[in-house]
Image (tube, rainbow, N blue to C red):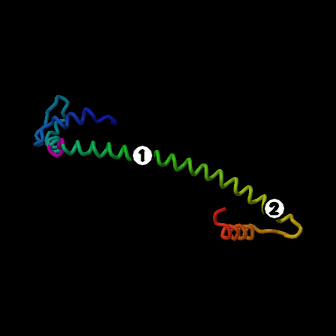
């Protein structure tokens, strides 16, 4: 049930003293349990539950929108990370092939990149 307008109207129109028990031809005869339930089920409680449900539904909508935005950012970052890894592998292979360098490990390459970043933090 997503539209609580009829339930809300009924709760707003209901007696506030808890004496709103109605017998129906389809009643299962369990009038004592039904009476306890109806006495405990106050209109103001129903209205509070409806308000909570609406607030939580709005919160869920907002969080789903935030989640979709976060997933789009993560997807973009993932593509950027894939490109970076491919460029890094090519750079390591290229640098290792230079006669005056010899083999370059990933750790060596990362250390050199970190050092350059510290020397030029705005790059």
Label 1 – label 2 distance at C-alpha: 46 Å
Q: Position of residue 8 (x, y in %)?
A: 23, 36
Q: Kindly identify the residue that appears in the image at 14 percent across and 33 percent down.
A: 23
**Main secondary structure found in the magenta portion:** helix
* In the rendered image, the vertical position of residue 113 relative to residue 58, given as above or below: below
Quadrant for the C terminus in the image: bottom right
Q: Which residue is mark 1?
A: 62
* In the rendered image, the vertical position of residue 83 relative to residue 121, given as above or below: above
How packed mark 2 is, by other alpha carbons closer than 10 Å (few <14, some 14-19, many 20 or more), is some
Q: Which residue, as the protein is rendered here, is positioned at the far top?
A: 25
Q: Determine the secondary structure under disc 1.
A: helix
* In the rendered image, the vertical position of residue 122 relative to residue 61, given as above or below: below
Q: Which residue is mark 2?
A: 93
**Image-quadrant location for residue 55:** top left
Q: Is residue 15 magenta?
A: no
Looking at the image, tell me whether mark 1 or mark 2 is earlier in sequence order.
1
- Which one is nearer the viewer's eye here, 101 or 22? 101
Q: Kindly identify the residue that appears in the image at 14 percent across and 41 percent down.
A: 35
In the figure, is residue 71 to the left or right of 28? right
Q: Kindly identify the residue that appears in the image at 84 percent across and 70 percent down.
A: 101
Quadrant for the N terminus in the image: top left
In the figure, is residue 9 to the left or right of 89? left
Q: Which residue, as the protein is rendered here, is positioned at the far right?
A: 99
Q: Is residue 41 magenta?
A: yes
Q: Position of residue 37 (x, y in %)?
A: 18, 44
Q: Which residues are magenta?
A: 39-43
């Amino acid at each position: 049930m997503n539209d609580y307008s009829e339930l809300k109207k009924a709760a707003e129109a209901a007696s506030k003293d808890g004496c709103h028990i109605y017998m129906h031809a389809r009643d299962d005869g369990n009038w004592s349990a039904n009476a306890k339930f109806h006495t405990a089920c106050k209109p103001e409680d129903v209205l509070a539950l409806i308000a909570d449900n609406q607030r939580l539904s709005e919160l869920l909508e907002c969080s789903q929108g935030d989640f979709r935005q976060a997933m789009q950012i993560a997807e973009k970052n993932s593509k950027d990370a894939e490109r970076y890894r491919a460029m890094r592998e090519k750079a390591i292979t290229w640098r290792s092939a230079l006669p005056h360098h010899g083999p370059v490990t990933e750790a060596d390459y990362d250390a050199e990149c970190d050092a350059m970043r510290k020397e030029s933090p705005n790059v």
